[in-house]
Image (cartoon, rainbow, N blue to C red):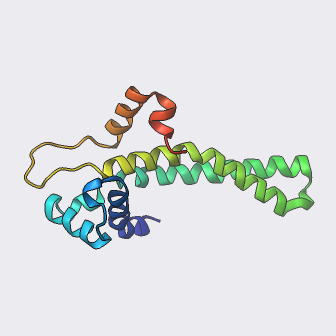
Amino acid sequence: GMLGLLSGHPLDTAKTRLQAMPRFSGSSTWRVVGETARLEGVLALYRGMSFPLWSACLVNAIVFSVQGAAERALSDALGADRARFNGFLAGCVAGLAQSPLVTAADLVKCQRQVQFAAKTASRTLPGPVAVLRRRVRHLGVLQGSMQGQ
């Protein structure tokens, strides 16, 4: 849950920066963590975390409600004696239903993780909503919020 996100996010930020930022090419994870903390401050390692935190409760609500509704519908259509199969199909439907939100949240998280702002800089970086809004404005709804899906 939230504790896992808090403890793992700095390493996820380092992984994202290793993959997306040429200046870290060939670097170790610990070098990325250290350089990010030194140049941008420790809080930079947590940049991009707000959107996954915010969307986690919504994702859980979607998954549990869709899975429950799908299991009931499948039980009526295919019979209650096929509980495992119905559960499997309901899980597939729930995964499909949550996919757009998870994809958009992860895309915004990654965009925020590669933003750079030196500790001494006075400029503020765009937040998660501004990042998503800008992407949708420039790329359209599908590519702006679902790129990579």
Point out residue 109 in the picture as x, y percentages from the top left corner: 38, 50
Point out residue 133 in the picture as x, y percentages from the top left corner: 37, 32
Outermost residue, front side: 26
Q: Looking at the picture, does residue 131 appear above or below residue 136?
A: below
Q: Is residue 135 left or right of residue 62?
A: left
Point out residue 5 in the picture as x, y percentages from the top left corner: 41, 64
Question: In what quadrant of the picture does the C terminus appear?
Answer: top right
Pick whichever, 10 or 23, lies toward us. 23
What's the residue at 17%, 43% (across, down)?
A: 124
What's the residue at 42%, 29% (across, down)?
A: 139
What's the residue at 58%, 47% (across, down)?
A: 99
Pick whichever, 69 or 18, lies toward us. 18
Q: Is residue 96 left or right of residue 137?
A: right
What's the residue at 26%, 66% (across, down)?
A: 32
Label count reads: 0
Pick whichever, 73 or 46, lies toward us. 46
Point out residue 21 in the picture as x, y percentages from the top left corner: 30, 53
